[in-house]
Amino acid sequence: MTLTHAAGRVRMADLPVEERPRERLERLGTSNLSTVELLAILIETGTRKHNALDVAQGLLSWAEEDGAHDGQSLRRILQASFEEMCRLEGIGRSKACKIKAAMELGRRLTAEALPKTLINSPRDIGNLLMEEMRHLEQEHFRVVHLGIKNQVLGVDLVSVGTVGSSLVHPREVFKHSIRKNATGVILVHNHPSGDPSPSREDFEVTRRIAEAGRILGIEVVDHIVIGDRRYSSLREQGADWNSA
């Protein structure tokens, strides 16, 4: 679909009916619309120079500036701050709220499928979180909560920033585990450098969290470090933190 900008701006109402995103959705269903068209439906209105499709394309182009594509670009939009989105041309506070809300609904829909996931090896954690975490520019520390048969009960973000005792407190790690009646947890964090080799601090943080877990009766099963398409398992490297 060719879009005209500036003086030759094409209003959405001037497009042929078969090219308008809303009408295409009604006729073809959501799965047959492009990402730009779906975003345009959320954005709804354009600016004096650009229609909603233009604004949507601008948003997607911004998300792809660092080389991200498809699901990666949507992930960048999901992770963008409210202030970042409001600074984009044609995206005000109202539109940013709609887009962020839609993204969060999608994230929660995905999360509802987590209890069906079973964790039998570090590779399962890699498959679950690698694509989401390997592009993060800061360290994110997450906890995967496990049930009796190692089914995933949920994944929670504990901290953002350099992993250390000042940011990763056992209270925050196990807060949701207790609510979910988890019997075990797997700690996960990423290295923005792309190298998943664990640091001495990674081992120390794991040991300290495991000590608190023993008191609560919640086992720290493993600690996975996510790199760029690679991961490291502290357990597979011979670490043993659950012995008294």
Image (tube, rainbow, N blue to C red):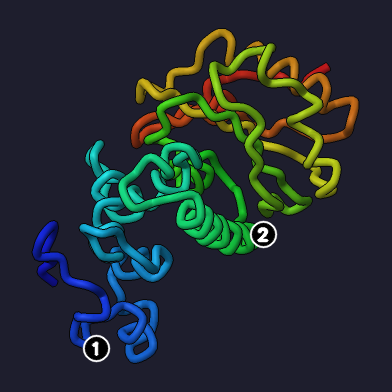
Looking at this view, name the residue that lies furthest to the top. Answer: 200
- Within the image, what quadrant is residue 187 found in? top right
Q: Note whether 189 is above or below 52 in the view shown.
A: above
Which quadrant does the C terminus fall into?
top right
Left or right of residue 40, residue 176 in this image: right
200 in relation to 220, above or below: above
- The residue lying at 74 percent from left, 31 percent from top is 173
| Viewer-nearest residue: 154 or 37 | 37
| Residue type of the residue flagged with mark 1 | Val
Quadrant showing the N terminus: bottom left
Residue under numbered circle 1: 17
Q: In this view of the protein, which residue sits in the foreground, 61 or 55?
A: 55
The numbered disc on residue 149 is: none
- Under circle 2, the secondary element is helix
When asked about the image quadrant of residue 234, the answer is: top right
Left of 142 or right of it: where is 67? left
Residue occupying the point 68% across, 21% down: 168
**Label 1 crowd bin: few (<14), some (14–19), many (20+), radius 10 Å:** few
Q: Which residue is mark 2?
A: 115
The one of 188 and 38 positioned closer to us in this rendering? 38
The residue sitting at 80% across, 43% down in the picture is 183
